[in-house]
Amino acid sequence: MKNTGIAIIVVGLLFTVITGFKYFTREKVLDIGSIKITASAPHRVNWSPLVGVGIMIVGGAVLVFGKKN
């Protein structure tokens, strides 16, 4: 459980430092016969740094209260 707790803490740290990401999708703007026009549309996914802090707290609890092997 020690390794699991440490891994969860590292994931929480990453969620705290990296608070989102951006990705692009291709959207069809115009489609007339053989003429096709597309555009890239950006989309953002964001979360609060508190989510990472919460994950780190859970990882600390797993580290402290997990069964010892």
Image: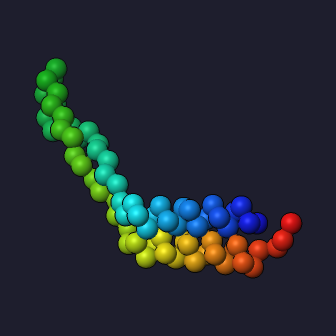
Residue at screen point 28% across, 44% down: 24
Q: Position of residue 55 (x, y in %)?
A: 55, 72
Residue 33 falls left or right of residue 50: left
Q: Quadrant of residue 57?
A: bottom right
Q: Where is residue 19 shown, x and y percent of the image?
A: 37, 64
Q: Is residue 20 above or below residue 56?
A: above
Q: Is residue 31 above or below residue 69?
A: above
Which quadrant holds residue 1? bottom right
The residue sitting at the right extreme is 69
Identify the image quadrant of residue 3: bottom right
Front residue of 42/61: it is 61
Image coordinates for residue 54, horizontal then vertical, percent: 52, 76
| Frontmost residue, 42 versus 63 | 63
Q: Residue furthest top?
A: 34
Side (left or right) of 9 relative to 30? right
Percent of width and height locating residue 46: 34, 64
Q: Residue at x 46, y 73 (%)?
A: 51
For this rendering, which residue is in front, 25 or 55? 55
**Residue at x-position 84% and y-position 71%:** 68
Residue found 34% across the figure and 55% down from its top: 21
The C terminus, quarter of image: bottom right
| Coloration of the structure image | rainbow
Q: Left or right: 36 with respect to 14?
A: left
In the rendered view, does 16 fall on the left or right side of 62?
A: left
